[in-house]
Amino acid sequence: MRAAVVGAGPSGFYASDQLLDAGFEVDLFDALPTPYGLVRAGVAPDHPKIKSVTRVYAKTAQHPAFRFFGGVQLGADIARDDLLARYDAVVYAFGTASDNRLGIPGEDLLGSHAATEFVGWYNGHPAHADHAFDLSSERAVVIGNGNVAIDVARMLTLTADELAATDTADHALAAFAGSRTREVVVLGRRGPAQAAFTNPELIELGELARADVTVDSEDVRLDAASAAWLESDAADRTARRNVEILKDYAARPPSGRSHRVVLRFLRSPLEVLDDGNGRVAGLRVAINRIEATATGGLQAVATGEEEVIDCGLVLRSIGYRGAPLAGIPFDDRSGLIRNDEGRVLDASGAPCPGEYTVGWIKRGPSGVIGTNKKCAGGTVARIVEDRDAGRLPVPASPGSEDVEMWLRTRVARLVTWDGWTVIDAHETAAGEPHGRPRVKLVRIPDMHAVAG
Ligand code: NAP
């Protein structure tokens, strides 16, 4: 039996690997000519160890029953029905490429961006390579208390030497070299006990070469509801340790480094302020307090007080969001493919035979890379159950040779695994003389020219 997996990020590779183990032939598709999804275009360039997980995926790609088809856009080059006509099972693994919006005035001013765009830009994603980020102001504000906010704050404060050893896109290296940003304020709408940071990432902020990390001791004084929650069984170890780390930061005297990362809490953005010329001049924020909800949660409630933080750059890092694609059943409320344990469901809640989903577009943008392995395990188990129960539909044109011929009629420049291998070798060779893991190609025509 043959499976198509759409999206060559971590969840797509883990699903492919497990489908191969279950005896399927697998064709893995990606809209880009390059594989690896957020490992290539999301993980921060100064985290090469995390990026080295691609070795595991490259091993999957060596399986004789595996093929990669890069540069194929589902919904544009090919349709959902095209895949269903050719494969016994189709697995959607295209992630949550969009971002959440704040919905406040001034959000679209020059200098106000989604962190997802900034991350894509410094990582050389072709869709973001031509973005411009003005790093000429003294202060930047990053809204959100997740690990992406930490990545962005760190990237804004790394030294040129630290960045020079990474695969940060060349256009971003040049912009960072000229950056005048000295202070990055990371803003949480709730308190330290509710931050979504993980411990190693928060600790890393305290070890930056040229930036002090600053926390106001008032900000880490816990309200009664948070203190009670932290003591209760409901609190997790990560939250307890986060609060300890933040209290340690609050007690640290500044060392006089040239840059600062300032972690502030209990502040909700109300308006991005205009400098009169359509550019960001600051952020007006509401000051919050924490209140317990009827269901046992802890929510931010405005106190009625406000303040203004002067800044020239605002990056909203408030979570990724999925977007509907190619008529695949989509739940607008959650921003995810409608599914039950990975089986895609139609509007009536019935399973769509032969269609499955995995990764962030299945369960939401959460967890670390390895979380996707378990997630893929769940989906592939459902596929195997359906296969064994004879519930997979029989495709109309099942030939594997035909697929490649058909694809070449739809896509002018199809990039196979061999093509990617040539791009990979080109990029790593370009990086080697500079002690960098690679110099990324950031434009699709350049990738095609190299892939041949
Ligand atoms: P995240 O962990 O879900 O954090 C989102 C943050 O945005 C939360 O602090 C949330 O606050 C805040 N937020 C949401 N809506 C808001 C609003 N309207 N106003 C103000 N704040 C708002 O998302 P993420 O940082 O994008 O990370 C996504 C996933 O990737 C996470 O699982 C993360 O751990 C993972 N990741 C891991 C690494 C790593 O391991 N090094 C690096 C990057 C990302 P509330 O809690 O109050 O909603």
Image (cartoon, rainbow, N blue to C red):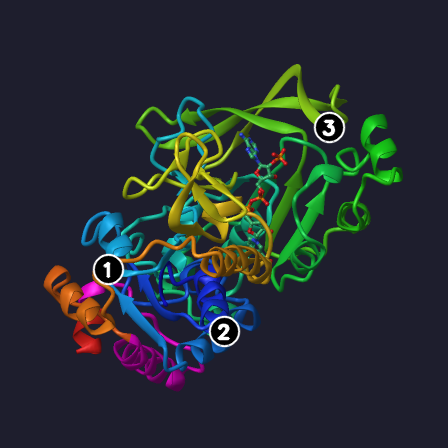
Q: Nearer the viewer, residue 12 or 64?
A: 64
Can residue 36 be seen in the rendering of this structure? yes
Q: Disc 1 versus disc 2: distance between alpha carbons? A: 25 Å
- In magenta stretch: residue 360: no
**Image x and y of residue 130, in percent:** 26, 53
Residue 348 location, quadrant = top left
Q: Quadrant of ligand 1?
A: top right
Q: Nearer the viewer, residue 353 or 55?
A: 353
Q: Disc 3 versus disc 1: distance between alpha carbons? A: 43 Å
Q: Residue at x 52, y 57 (%)?
A: 385
**Lateral position of residue 366 relative to residue 69, left or right:** right
Please tell me which of labels 1 and 2 falls first in the chain: 2
Q: Quadrant of the N terminus?
A: bottom left
Between disc 1 and disc 2, the foreground one is: 2
Q: Residue at x 47, y 71 (%)?
A: 17
Between disc 2 and disc 3, the foreground one is: 2
Q: Nearer the viewer, residue 131 or 232?
A: 232
Q: Quadrant of the C terminus?
A: bottom left
**Image x and y of residue 435, in percent:** 45, 82
Q: Which residue is mark 2?
A: 21
